[in-house]
Image: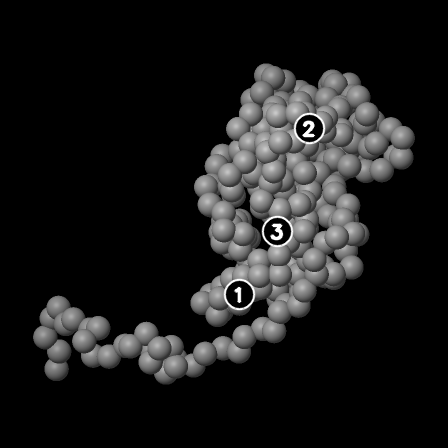
Amino acid sequence: MSEPRLRTVNKVQPPYRLGLFKRESIISIAGGIVYLLHTRNEARLEGPDWEKIFAESIGAEWKPSNIGLDDVQFGCCCWGAKTVKNRYPSTAKSVRLISGRNSLDYSYGKSDVRSLPPQSVGSDVIEIWNERVSSVRERFAHVRTVVLLKSSDLSECALFEVDTVRFDPTLFDWTWNRRGNLEGRELKTKRHRFTWQPHGSQFTIIEDVPANRVAFRIRLPGALSKDVVLGAIGFDDTWVEFIDAVR
């Protein structure tokens, strides 16, 4: 659903235009990834690590929250940060974003959802998401989702962001698929936009990768030897305290 133009909101400018990342921010992100590869010795980047890397790259604060939509904050703007593994990040056209757990049992006291009309269930799922977005928009003029598409070894990435918006549930057709999950499709285009899993309540939004996404490759660092690491941190015999006598 498109966002209305409001006089008070549009006077408050975000730190940069949507998706127009600065060159130094991309280099900072690449440096954070290389640092993790060096220190962990494994290609793993997700959750809080990505949030912290992105926050540092734009000079924002990392403030993890239960909502998950405002973990990175900069003045009037906040971000939810997500990573998605993809074989070819630079050419990906769409991405599935796991966007929280929307439990109808917890929020509405509805447990036997398969006995309810799928349109009603879909509307409830969307309204839980909308309420979450509204609670964040009460505090921030601009709410965004920043996504890092990553290859399995983190050598290739694509970065983009989208506005985090509320959705009108009446604009979507809801049906149960063969796996027992609920799918929401746009009425006009029949495009698949949402998936909701009744077991676990996981809610997924399918987003197009925008044309202004930034794709980049990183030269992977070689492994450091033990002697190089110990020398760099200044390790010597003073680091060892004997508790019992040794022979």
Q: Where in the figure is residue 243, as x and y percent of width and height?
A: 13, 68
Q: Give the secondary structure at mark 2.
A: loop
Find residue 21 and report its horizontal and vertical position in percent.
64, 54
Q: 130 or 106: nearer the eye?
A: 130
Nearer-the-camera pick, 159 or 36: 159
Between discs 1 and 2, the one toward the N terminus = 1
| Rendering quarter of residue 44 | bottom right
Residue at image location 73% in from the left, 36% down from the top: 195
Gap in angstroms between the C-alphas marked 2 and 3: 21 Å
Q: Pointer 1: what residue?
A: 31
Is residue 186 found left or right of 39 in the rendered image?
Answer: right
Q: Tell me which residue sits at (66%, 68%) in the image.
A: 217
Label 2 CA crowd tier, 10 Å (few <14, some 14–19, many 20+): some
Residue marked by disc 2: 166
Total number of numbered discs in the rendering: 3
Q: Return the residue at label 3.
A: 83
Q: Does residue 133 show up?
A: no
Cβ atoms under marks 3 and 1 closer than 8 Å = no
Is residue 196 visible to us here? yes
Residue closest to the eye, 150 or 70: 70
* Screen quadrant of the C terminus: bottom left
Structural crowding at the residue carrying mark 1, measured as other residues with C-alpha within 10 Å and reported as few (<14), some (14–19) or many (≥20): some
Amino acid on which the number 3 mark rests in the picture: Thr
Distance, label 3 to label 1, CA atoms, is: 17 Å
Q: Amino acid at mark 1?
A: Gly
Q: Please tell me whether residue 16 is drawn above or below residue 154 in the rendered image.
A: above
**Element on which disc 3 rests:** strand
Up the image or down, 36 lies above or below 131; here it is below
Query: Residue 46: which disc?
Result: none
Q: In screen coordinates, is 215 left or right of 106?
A: right
